[in-house]
């Protein structure tokens, strides 16, 4: 399986390290394939599970490992391989928003993020979740609209297209 990889900025690598660490609570430097899939879903990648699984298998095969675990560099390669693919970026972001808007009120709130973390078995503190909302909340209403969500994601090169 060959997909074009786009280079990640230092900021994106730092952000992805934060995501990786969420799924590596023991801090041993590895996450399991199911955690990679959960992380990719949380990041808004909605590719078919089979595609992500094949990218994981490819990384494990390349490294010659027997164990089914992924280190941070391999995680970066998987994310990089998934960005800029043939899927409609707006559709991907809209689906990501819908997955996060748990109560379907048109906004992502602290309550939504708490439920998402519970669903994904991710342990984040309220202040970390509040900070996520603060970073995306452009009008200061304490919640993230679909437009704000779209704007914040379009600022990363994970989505290299223009609105």
Image: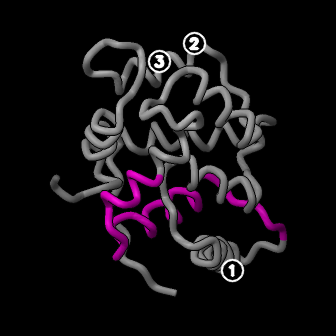
Picture coordinates of residue 74, whole percent (x, y): 58, 62
Give the alpha-carbon distance from disc 1 to disc 3, as whole Å. 38 Å
Residue linked to disc 1: 61
Picture coordinates of residue 105, whole percent (x, y): 48, 32
Depth order, front residue of 57/138: 138
Residue 145 lies in the magenta stretch = no
Residue linked to disc 2: 127
Work out whether 124 lies above or below 39: above
In the image, is 68 to the left or to the right of 42?
A: right
Picture coordinates of residue 31, whole percent (x, y): 73, 52
Work out whether 124 lies above or below 101: above
Q: Residue furthest left?
A: 162
Residue 85 lies in the magenta stretch = yes
Q: Helix, strand or loop at disc 2?
A: helix
Read off the magenta span: 67-95
Q: Quadrant location of residue 2?
A: bottom left
Residue placed at 77% from the left, 39% from the top? Answer: 121
Work out whether 14 lies above or below 126: below
Looking at marks 1 and 2 on the same chain, the residue that comes earlier in the sequence is marked by: 1
The disc placed on residue 131 is: 3
Is residue 24 among the parts visible in the rendering? no
Q: Quadrant location of residue 27?
A: top right
Q: Helix, strand or loop at disc 1?
A: helix
């Amino acid at each position: 399986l060959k997909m074009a990889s786009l280079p990640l900025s230092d900021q994106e690598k730092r952000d992805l390290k934060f995501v990786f660490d969420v799924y590596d609570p023991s801090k041993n430097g590895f996450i399991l394939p199911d955690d990679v899939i959960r992380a990719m879903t949380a990041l808004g990648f909605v590719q078919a599970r089979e595609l992500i699984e094949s990218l994981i298998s490819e990384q494990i095969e390349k490294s010659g490992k027997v164990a089914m675990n992924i280190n941070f560099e391999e995680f970066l390669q998987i994310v990089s391989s998934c960005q800029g693919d043939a899927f409609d970026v707006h559709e991907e972001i809209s689906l990501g928003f819908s997955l996060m808007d748990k109560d379907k009120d048109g906004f992502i709130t602290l309550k939504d993020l708490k439920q998402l973390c519970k669903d994904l078995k991710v342990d984040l503190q309220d202040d970390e979740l509040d900070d996520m909302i603060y970073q995306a909340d452009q009008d200061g209403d304490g919640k993230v609209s679909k437009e704000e969500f779209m704007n914040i994601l379009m600022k990363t090169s994970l989505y290299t297209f223009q609105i």
